Amino acid sequence: MRYTLLLHYPEMSPEELGPEGQEHGQRAFGAYAATLHAAGVLVSGEVLQPSVATTTVRSVDGALRVQDGPFADTKEQLGGTFVIDVPDLDAALAWARQAPSAEWGPVEVRPGAVHVVDGSWTPNA
């Protein structure tokens, strides 16, 4: 069963974070990704650019609107994702607890419904 771990945490500029903070984060997430990979559960991972680089598209009264910035105005922003393939929710929660960002903000665990394999939609099982 595929689960996506959505990592939310307060955004900080490189200046606010500082070189030591950046190195700590890179080491922590690198180790986490390596652990997921070694366990054979990592499907993919993505670190996102800051939310200021976000563009949101939505339909309002039948017309598409394009808006600069994230959809939600919150203290924590979606900073990255990991897609894992594990037997069940308990296993996904165990991996989510180990995410370095769990110390700074919520980690949303969401099961996948379908995914694309070789151009075809495949139900998540």
Image (cartoon, rainbow, N blue to C red):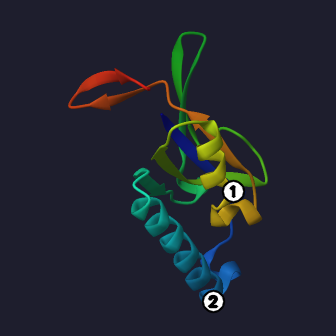
Residue 116 pos. (x, y %): 32, 30
Is residue 12 shown left or right of residue 62? Answer: right
Above or below residue 96? Residue 110 is above
Identify the element where label 2 is drawn.
helix
State whether residue 17 appears in this view: yes
Q: Residue at 53%, 42% (x, y): give it.
A: 4
- Viewer-proximal residue, 117 or 19? 117
Residue 53 pos. (x, y %): 53, 54
Q: Quadrant of residue 34?
A: bottom left
- Viewer-proximal residue, 41 or 74? 41
Q: Quadrant of residue 45?
A: bottom left
Identify the element where label 1 is drawn.
helix
Q: Disc 2 vs disc 1: which is toward the camera?
A: 1
Query: Tag 1: residue type?
Result: Arg
Above or below residue 92? Residue 22 is below
Q: Residue at 77%, 48% (x, y): give it.
A: 74
Residue 2 pos. (x, y %): 47, 37
Query: Tag 2: residue type?
Result: Glu
Q: Residue at 67%, 80% (x, y): give it.
A: 17
Category of crowding for the residue at label 1, using alpha-carbon neighbours closer than 10 angstroms: few (below 14), some (14–19), many (at least 20): few
Residue placed under numbered mark 1 in the picture: 97
Is residue 25 shown left or right of residue 64? Answer: right
How far, Cα to Cα, is label 2 from label 1?
A: 24 Å
